[in-house]
């Protein structure tokens, strides 16, 4: 409806502006179509904005009106009870066969329905009125020398700005909500107990002292061990070597197909890596453990999860290393070769040291990706929170525990559930710091060769 | 060519052509380079002088599409022969590039790079002696002796280029190739490099590519003029600049083109 009005406004304005164009001796400042856009925007944007606000405000208006109606006289004074009856009434209003519920709700339902319809009509009428008003205002401003071009430009710019701010505000919002829930957790469990406690068993929580079984150190250790040690032992050498091969040795043709293939690894859904870890790698690791003399080896091991995670991370390390190796000036390479160094001497003594900051940044980004990874550990690692150096033993990670805590059946404000938020917050802060450090390293390094 | 001396030449090129894919950048060039002389290659941009210079230490090998034909000898041995080790060759024929390219390492490590690779120093004190000697020969010692552990890239452009020269002479080469070594430097730094070339003459055979004719006249004893991939004229620098035999040379040095 409003879009239609907008289109009409657009057409009218363009026609009007075009008439100026033909009749006047003065040239139009802006193209007819830009006048059209100007009017169209004035017709569409204000009512849309109004509707957005209206849809947020109207439910509470409906509520107020319903509560004041005579049918609501019998409602309980208790907020909780009242709300539940109202919710039932709302459900019945939407779907008359929805509930057998409370007789009071049945009674209220028509009132709710009618009030809602009324407010919906009011909202729509106001929106259409706004559309007309905006359109008329904009049309009245069309003159040959009217600078519609710059106005449209500015509006577009604002639109783009809003689009980019949404991502930032979402991040902020996530952080705030995590932070909020975490403070609730830390009201019940002291932060030191959570951060430094070494015993983690959320299944058995002592109500008097919940912190005693919510010490997150085993989780941090498991996360670090799987994500930053085992995975990196796979990802760093393979990623770096493939980057060196691709930039220094591979012919242009090889590089053309090999680089995209390698980067495809980054596009494989992590669930698929999860299958691979659980069904292929984990049993193989278990066989190895049995061979090494542990007949009771679990099929869920830190090694299996870490290995597959490392493979998943290879493209990150390799493409960052690739970029930073390629950014080392050719003059550097030539200088070394002209000294009589071989290609491999040149790589190990000049190119890799020169590219090191970029490589380090790539590794940091890869680590932050690895410790945030969930699917692989959910499928291949176990829930047993142990602090161990033995990669064949099972270990668990922060992400895996968050999944376990939130999928269990527990009230929303128990320490057990809230612990998930505290874990999430910790993880968020750690990856954020890693990313910041990595970006700073990259920036500093880029400046060196400009 | 009357200018060539009868004594055995340090390096000789005979009928050398260089191709980039199908394009011929250097056409059938023959030239001799002698120990106690500075030889300058001049000519307009794109005339093939730098490409030709890079055939002397086989740096064209690093460009996949480049192909070299003809013969180049160092002390009579063909440097493109199968048994010629390119690592050994480049230790004997050093190179300094147009843009100073010190490694992102300390000043000391920059100079020590070659001796380390070629195993020239038996001990740490040996290595320190080589570094000091090279920096002294490159006229940089006084300026950097107190900050050898600073990064080579933190030096000024002129100092960086002298550091690159020190790096090249640290492996005690016989020939030094310089590819427009002063074109990225200011006049004062350029004067220092030219002075340095004077001092290095006699100890090394020096070949310098330059697009600056005054520079060629100042630093070289022999000059070769290249145009469109061909060697137009080669002779004593004084003769070439005062009495060029070829019309094209005359046009170029009088500023008619280039």
Image (cartoon, rainbow, N blue to C red):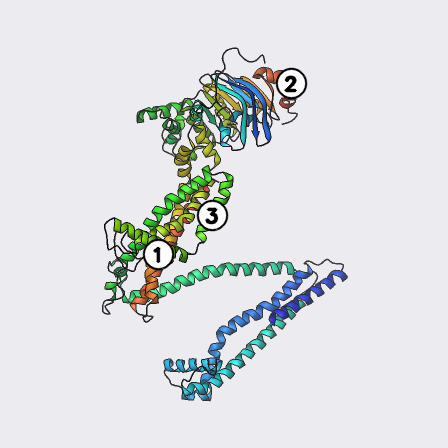
* Same chain shared by disc 3 and disc 2: no
> Residue at the spot x=24%, y=58% of the render?
A198
What is the C-alpha distance between the residues marked 3 and 2? 58 Å
Can you give x and y, in whole percent of width and height, for residue B230 in the image?
Answer: 61, 23
Nearer the N terminus, badge 1 or badge 3? 3
Residue placed under numbered mark 2 in the picture:
B246
Label 1 element class: helix
3 or 2: mark nearer the eye: 3
- In the image, is residue A104 above or below residue A36? below
2 or 1: mark nearer the eye: 1
Can you give x and y, in whole percent of width and height, for residue A142 in the image?
Answer: 68, 65
A276 lies left or right of A394: right
Label 2 element class: loop
Can you give x and y, in whole percent of width and height, for residue B232 in the image?
Answer: 61, 20
Tell me the tag on residue A261. 3
Image quarter of residue A206: bottom left
Q: Residue furthest top?
A: B6
- In the image, is residue A387 above or below residue B122? below
Give A389 or B46, whichever is nearer the viewer: A389
How many residues crowd around disc 2 within 10 Å: few (fewer than 14), some, or many (20 or more)? few
Can you give x and y, in whole percent of width and height, for residue B128 in the image?
Answer: 34, 26
What is the C-alpha distance between the residues marked 2 and 1? 80 Å
Residue placed under numbered mark 1 in the picture:
A278
How many residues crowd around disc 1 within 10 Å: few (fewer than 14), some, or many (20 or more)? many
Image quarter of residue B214: top right
* Same chain shared by disc 1 and disc 3: yes
- In the image, is residue A63 above or below residue A380? below
Label 3 element class: helix
């Amino acid at each position: 409806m409003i879009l239609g009005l907008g289109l009409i406004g657009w057409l009218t304005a363009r026609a009007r502006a075009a008439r100026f164009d033909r009749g006047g001796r003065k040239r139009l400042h802006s193209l007819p179509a830009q006048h059209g856009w100007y009017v169209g925007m004035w017709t569409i944007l204000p009512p849309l904005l109004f509707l957005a606000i209206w849809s947020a405000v109207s439910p509470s208006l409906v509520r107020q009106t319903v509560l004041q109606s005579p049918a609501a006289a019998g409602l309980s004074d208790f907020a909780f009870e009242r709300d539940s009856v109202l919710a039932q009434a709302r459900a019945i209003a939407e779907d008359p066969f929805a509930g057998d519920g409370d007789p009071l709700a049945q009674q209220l339902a028509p009132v709710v329905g009618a009030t809602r319809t009324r407010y919906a009509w009011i909202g729509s009428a106001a929106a259409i009125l706004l559309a007309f008003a905006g359109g008329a205002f904009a049309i009245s401003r069309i003159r040959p020398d009217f600078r519609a071009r710059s106005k449209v430009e500015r509006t577009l710019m604002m639109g783009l700005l809003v689009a980019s701010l949404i991502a930032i505000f979402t991040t902020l919002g996530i952080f705030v909500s995590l932070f909020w829930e975490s403070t609730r957790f830390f009201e019940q469990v002291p932060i030191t107990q959570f951060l430094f406690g070494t015993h983690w068993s959320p299944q058995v929580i002592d109500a008097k002292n919940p912190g005693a079984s919510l010490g997150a150190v085993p989780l941090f250790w498991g996360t670090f061990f799987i994500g930053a040690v085992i995975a990196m032992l796979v990802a760093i050498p393979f990623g770096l070597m493939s980057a060196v091969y691709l930039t220094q040795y591979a012919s242009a043709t090889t590089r053309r197909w090999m680089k995209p293939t390698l980067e495809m690894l980054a596009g494989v859904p992590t669930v698929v890596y999860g299958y691979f870890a659980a069904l292929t790698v984990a049993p193989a690791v278990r066989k190895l453990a049995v061979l090494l003399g542990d007949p009771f080896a679990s099929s869920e091991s830190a090694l299996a999860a870490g290995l597959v995670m490392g493979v998943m991370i290879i493209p990150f390390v390799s493409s960052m290393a690739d970029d930073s190796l390629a950014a080392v000036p050719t003059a550097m390479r030539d200088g070394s070769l002209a000294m009589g160094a071989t290609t491999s001497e040149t790589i190990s003594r000049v190119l890799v040291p020169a590219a090191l900051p970029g490589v380090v940044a790539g590794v940091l980004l890869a680590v932050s990706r690895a410790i945030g990874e969930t699917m692989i550990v959910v499928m291949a690692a176990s829930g047993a929170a142990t602090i161990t150096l033995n990669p064949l033993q099972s270990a668990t990670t922060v992400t895996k525990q968050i999944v376990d805590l939130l999928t269990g059946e527990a009230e929303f404000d128990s320490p057990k559930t809230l612990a998930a938020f505290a874990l999430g917050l910790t993880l968020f802060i750690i990856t954020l710091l890693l990313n910041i450090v990595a970006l700073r390293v990259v920036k500093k390094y880029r400046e060196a060769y400009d | 060519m009357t200018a060539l001396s009868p004594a055995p030449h340090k390096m000789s090129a005979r009928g050398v052509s260089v191709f980039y894919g199908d394009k011929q950048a250097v056409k059938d060039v023959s030239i001799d380079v002698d120990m106690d002389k500075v030889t300058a290659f001049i000519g307009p941009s794109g005339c093939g002088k730098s490409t030709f210079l890079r055939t002397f230490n086989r740096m064209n090998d690093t460009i996949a599409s480049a192909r070299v034909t003809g013969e180049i000898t160092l002390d009579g041995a063909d440097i493109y022969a199968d048994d010629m080790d390119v690592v050994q060759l480049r230790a004997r024929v050093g190179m300094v590039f147009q843009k100073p390219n010190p490694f992102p390492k300390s000043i000391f490590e920059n100079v020590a790079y070659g001796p380390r690779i070629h195993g020239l120093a038996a001990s740490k004190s040996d290595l320190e002696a080589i570094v000091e000697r090279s920096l002294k020969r490159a006229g940089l010692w006084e300026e950097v002796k107190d900050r050898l552990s600073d990064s080579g890239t933190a030096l000024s452009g002129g100092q960086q280029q002298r550091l690159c020269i020190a790096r090249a002479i640290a492996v005690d080469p016989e020939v030094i190739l310089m590819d427009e070594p002063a074109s990225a430097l200011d006049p004062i730094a350029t004067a220092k490099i030219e002075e340095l070339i004077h001092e290095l003459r006699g100890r090394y055979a020096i070949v310098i590519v330059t697009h600056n004719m005054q520079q060629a006249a100042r630093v070289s004893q022999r000059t070769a003029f290249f145009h469109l991939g061909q060697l137009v004229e080669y002779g004593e620098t004084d003769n070439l600049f005062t009495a060029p035999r070829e019309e094209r040379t005359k046009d170029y040095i009088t500023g008619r083109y280039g």
